[in-house]
Amino acid sequence: MPIQTINPYNNKLIQSFDALTESELEHKLAQAHRAYLSWRNEPVSVRAELLHKVSDIMLQRKNELAKLITLEMGKLIAQSESEIEMCASVYQYYADHAAAFLEDKPLEVSDGSAFIRYTPTGIILGVEPWNFPFNQVGRITAPNIVAGNVVMIKHASNVPQCAAMMETIFKEAGAPEGVYTNLFLPGDKIAALAADERVTGLSLTGSEKAGASLAEAAGKNLKKSVLELGGSDAFIILDDADIDLAVEKAVLGRFNNMGQSCTSSKRIIALEAVADEFLDKFKAKIIGLKVGDPLDPDTKIGPMVSEEAAARLAEQVDDTVKAGAKIVTGGKRIDREGAFYDFTILTDIPKGSVAYREELFGPVASFYKVRDIEAAVALANDTGFGLGGSVFSRDTDKAIAVASRIDTGMVFINQNVASRPDLPFGGTKRSGYGRELSQLGIEEFVNKKVIRIA
């Protein structure tokens, strides 16, 4: 499959790239390994300074980088600019906090003394998705490079210009050759990379199928892996919630990035007492929005990432409606050129239907009305996914009690799930394992070496 940029706004090919040959790949692996042998010995301050420079360059070139995101995967331009700001903040965060995170950790022992020393391990391979083409790369790259590892990134094949640009930024920042390496490769080359002894850890953000394949390759070769996979996050509205706030956050949580986020608020679950009010206000917020060019700041509904993605979403919605679900609004492709799908709300979704059991990776909200908290929790947990979730209530203690019963890696109170550098990010069940961001993110691919003193 060619590595191509196709603009989803008009489905036109912009640029193509050649995949690496076997000899080119070997050259890059050897270069990365040589870089690691030197980079691991650099002081944390030197490694942190590189991240500071990367952050500064991204902010200086924000408009250029944001436009690249929008052209390659269709994100609204304001959201693309926000992504660049978020990504820069990740590099800044690890540059500022790495020294403290990597300090020796004393251990309490019965005699003598002991401590944990955090040491790098080698080349970390990141397999990254198209939906946040800069920020997702930053989440694996920043903590590992500042910890003394080097990274090789196999990015999604439909955002090759973003992939190449990130390598360029590291070079501009003064990174030694091999500290950051972009790999133009098809996905079927990952298993061979996992087997290479120079690669010591693997991280993937993407689909369940891709995650299972990477985990199999990593496990077969006794390599550590971190997976951030799909999600079907519950957005629970209790009967004492601030409904206007819940509506505002539901619109943002479900339709940001055209609903193409693992932590998107895909299942909205409202108690009966407030369900009708919420649904009326929610619908009113998403009808009549301007559809058009994602580079136009006034556009509110842009394209999905590809024609294939839009067609797949349409099929999922149609199958769910055939099973008995009702369309409140939307529910169709928008009649124009490009990978467009209308903002949609589904209700009366039958248990076991497509929308009930699968992740809808696009601008479709599944709305459920339930009788009480017990039913809300049971529905929230009736999924194989376990990434994030939200609970809305004016009673914080009650909201926390509900949050503690939801089987996910993250729950936000009175807010849609959002990524921040200082919060651990990750899930459970079929949503993956391991954590990105915060101190936990920097600990995933380092050796926690115990040093014992008699």
Image (tube, helix red, strand yellow):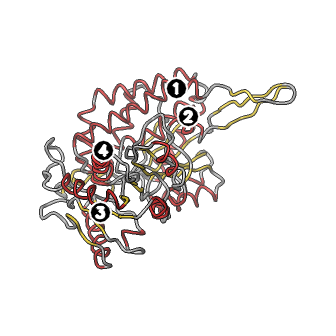
| Location of residue 149 with respect to 429 vertically, above or below | above
Q: How many marks?
A: 4
Residue 278: image x %, image y %?
Answer: 28, 55
CA gap between label 2 and label 4 equals: 31 Å
The disc at residue 439 is: 2
Q: Nearer the viewer, residue 224 or 42?
A: 224
Label 1: few (<14), some or many (≥20) within 10 Å?
Answer: some
SS at badge 3: helix
Three-letter code, disc 1: His
* Sequence order check, earlier mark of 2 and 1: 1
For image coordinates 63% across by 51% down, the residue present is: 223
Name the N-terminal-most of marks 2 and 4.
4
Kindly state the secondary structure of the residue where label 1 is placed: helix
Tell me the number on the disc at residue 97. 1
Q: Earlier in the sequence, mark 4 or mark 3?
A: 4
Image quadrant for the C terminus?
top right
Residue 238 to residue 437: above or below: below
User: First in sequence: mark 3 or mark 1?
Assistant: 1
Residue 334 sits above or below residue 36 on the image: below
Q: Is residue 188 visible?
A: no
422 over 103 or under it: above or below: below
Amino acid on which the number 3 mark rests in the picture: Ala
CB under 8 Å between discs 2 and 1 = yes
Residue that badge 4 annotates: 245
Give whichever of 67, 374 is nearer the camera: 374
Left or right of 5 in this view: 28: right
Crowding at dot 4, Cα within 10 Å, few <14 / some 14-19 / many 20+, comes out as few
Q: Nearer the N terminus, badge 2 or badge 3?
A: 3
The residue that disc 3 covers is 309
Q: On the image, which quarter does residue 344 sit in?
A: bottom left
